[in-house]
Each structure stands twice: as C-alpha cells, then as structure tokens.
Image (cartoon, helix red, strand yellow):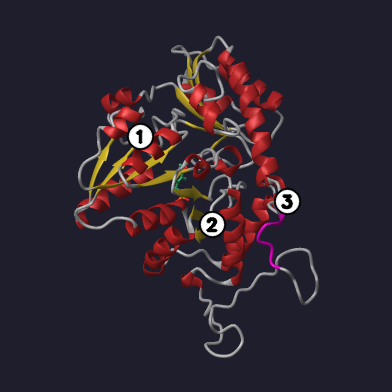
Amino acid sequence: MSTKKKFPTRCVHEGEIKDTMYQGIVSPLFMSTTYPWFGGDAEKKPYPRYFNTPNQEFLSKKIASLENGEKALIFTSGMAAISTSIMANVRSGDHVIFQEDLYGGTRNFIKTEFDKYGIEYSFTKGLESEDFKNEIKDNTVGIYVETPSNPLLKIVDLKSVSSIAKQNSIWTMIDNTFASPVNQNPIDHGIDIVIHSATKYLGGHSDISAGAVVSTEENINLILNSAKNFGGNLSDYTVWLLERSMKTLFIRVREQTNNAKLLAKMLDENSNISKVYYPGLESHPSHEIAKNQMKGFGAMMSFDLNKDIDVYKFLKNLKVIKPGMSLAGVETTVNFPMKTSHGLLTQDERDNQGIGNKLIRLSVGIESYEDLYNDLDQAIKNSSE
Ligand SMILES: *Cc1c(COP(=O)(O)O)cnc(C)c1O
C-alpha cells in the first residue's frame, strides 16, 4: 500500500517539523543563521544561503510533494526562482525557446540579461506544437512555457511540448503559477522543472513574497549550485509563514476555482460583456487540452467589456472587488492590462497580442460568487459612456 497521502492531507502535514521539546502541533521556527562546524549535526552545515536551514528544508518537502517532484528550493521571489533556474541551465552560446505569451518580468529578464552573457533565445510565433518545433536549432538546450498564460489564459499542450523536448534531448521548464499545484502538476505530463511565484497562490493572502522550484534531485542539485552564488534564499521567518499559508492551499484554491467556473459562465451570458477568456468554458479554443492536463481550470480569467462601457467608471463602481496589480489572494481583484502589465507596449503590439482596450483581468477570491457577480453586474450597468 502506498504511504503517499492525498493532496489535501499533504497540504496540511507534509514537511512538518516535529516539536520534540514541547510537542506543540505547529512546526517550530528556527531562526539561527549559524550552526556548529563540528559535533552534533555538523555534516549538514545549515546556513540560510545554502538553502538548508531546518525550516527551508522541511517546507521544500511539502512543495516538492505537492508537485510530485523529488526535491524543491524556496526563493525570495518568483523572479529569483525563475532567473536562478534558467541561469543554472544555460551557458554562453546556448539557445532557449520561450513561448510568445510570458509573464512581463520573465520577458524583461530575458531581454535585458541574455545578450550580456551571449545566450540566444527566440519566442514562438504561436502556442501550437509546431510553433515550438519550428524554433529548434542545433544549439537549443531548453523550452520554457507558462500555461495558462497571462492575461488571455492561453493553453500550451504540456505532453506534446515535453515529447518534442525529449526527442531533442533538451530540458523543459514551466511557470506553473497561474494553475497552482492544486489545478496542474506538470511533472506528471513530462515537464522537467516546475517554478512558482509563491507570492501568488502558495502564499495566497497577498502578504508574502516568495518563489519555488521543483524537479528531480539531480536537477535541483544543479540549480542549488547556482542558487548559492546568486543568493536568493527566503528568510526563515517568511518560510514559516509560507508553511502556514500552504496548509489551506487546497481549500482556498478549490473554492477560488469553483467560484471562477460559476462566474465565467455567468459573465459569458452577460450581454454587456463581449468575450470571456477562461479555459473552463467549452468555447475556449484549447478547452479540451486544458481538460486533459488540468485538475481544475484555475481562478484567473479575463473578459472584454462592450465598446460602450467606460472602463474607469466600471472600476470605480466596484464595491466588493478591489483593483490589484498582483493576483491569487483570497480577495477578488481586478486589473486593467492595457494600463498596467502591458502599458509599455504600443497599441499595435497590444492589438497583435489581443490585449484590447476593454480587457479586464479578474483574480477570483473566496467570497460568495453571488456577491462577486452582483458587484460586477451593477458596476457594468452603471458605466455606460
Ligand atoms: C507574479 C508572477 C511572477 C513573478 O513572481 P514574483 O514573486 O513577483 O517575483 C512570475 N510568473 C507569474 C505567472 C506571475 O504571476
């Protein structure tokens, strides 16, 4: 009989530190930055920047387990996890393929850093398997994807990308932030390295900055070699807070996902909304792929307001839902990509990417979906131009 507990149980209990002094039920917090170099457990030489203090080591077991990986590392931000994982897996002269739709920070990292180190890259022209195949060159070492993508919730077929990579003996890396481990486990679909901005769902309360990477022990040891040099470790106190947050990961994201599914359907039927982008809708072009690789469709969605609706009036009229640049907290937030994440692009670039002037991104929280729908509906009704 397998001893691996079910997902919700692992969210609560995996990687707990036993309180051997007082038998308290919560993991103790060890804040020491120095440990003995002889006697005791001297062989381990815990040190925060070695990513091996007790709280880092134990919480990384929980994160690895929830992604069905062997080992994990915890970072101070999602970008620290992304930049360190990529830099550990490339050298000058290598070429990496990135999907066209990428988180802005990741795109910026590639565009500002790669040239300095002589690393080549290309962005795909679309998200079909052929689009990835077309970019493979003799010096390609890896493929980096992000699905569902921001802000249009486009889907990449993980099995087909991982099989292309395996045929070419190159690595695959995914930013799994939007789905969270509750809704998608990419390692099960053949992806090698899974990254999270734990600032989002893993933290879930809009009050922690953190990141994580999960893979095989071999891959994580390779990333660790670079991580020690770049030094993006998370403070043990925040590691401990992240553990507390992650105990409720399953129930939070399950509720957020259920809310999103109901809201997407209701918004899709609202005559003041011209289009809803959500992989759970049957009308989504990649609904079938999403169904095959996701356990749930996630809690992020976007929609286009009708032409005659004033976006700023709409945003001002919202009473329950708050404007928020970031996402994934227990509170529902709205973002206006044209003015925020994609504000620096030209109108042409936005048009090419399908980022319309009435596009609203919604991060669905755990409030009652009825209150959320009513709030959106009344705000729309009172926002004609
Ligand atoms: C927020 C985010 C990141 C970056 O994470 P930080 O914790 O802000 O560094 C990366 N990818 C996605 C999809 C994100 O939403």
Q: CA distance from mark 1 to mark 2?
A: 39 Å
Among numbered discs 3 and 2, the one appearing first in the sequence:
3
Residue beneath disc 2: 70
Quadrant of the rendered structure where residue 179 is? top right
Question: Residue 52, which numbered label?
Answer: none
Cβ of mark 2 under 8 Å from ligand 1: the answer is no
Please tell me how many numbered marks the rendered image carries. Answer: 3
Question: Hey, which residue is sitting farthest top in the picture?
Answer: 271
Name the residue tied to disc 3. 1
Q: Indicate the position of residue 369 as horizontal and vertical percent values.
A: 68, 26
What is the quadrant of residue 281 in the picture?
A: top right
Residue depicted at 73% across the width and 69% down the height:
18
Q: Residue at x 60, y 59 (%)?
A: 61
For this orientation, the residue located farthest to the front is: 1
N-term mark: 1 or 2: 2
Other residues around mark 3 within 10 Å, as few (<14) / some (14–19) / many (≥20): few
Residue 66 vs residue 142: left or right? right
Residue at (53%, 42%) from the top-left corner? 188
Q: Amino acid at mark 2?
A: Glu
Bin the neighbour count of mark 1 within 10 Å (Cα to Cα): few under 14, some 14-19, many 20 and up. Answer: few
Residue mark closest to the camera, 3 vs 2: 3
Mark 1 or 2: the one toward you: 2
User: Residue shown at 28%/37% (left/top)?
Assistant: 123
Q: CA distance from mark 3 to mark 1?
A: 54 Å
Answer yes or no: do the residues labelled 1 and 2 have beta carbons within 8 Å? no
* Residue projecting furthest to the bottom: 39
Q: Is residue 15 magenta?
A: yes
Q: Which residues are magenta?
A: 12-17
The residue under label 1 is 343
Q: Amino acid at mark 1?
A: Gly
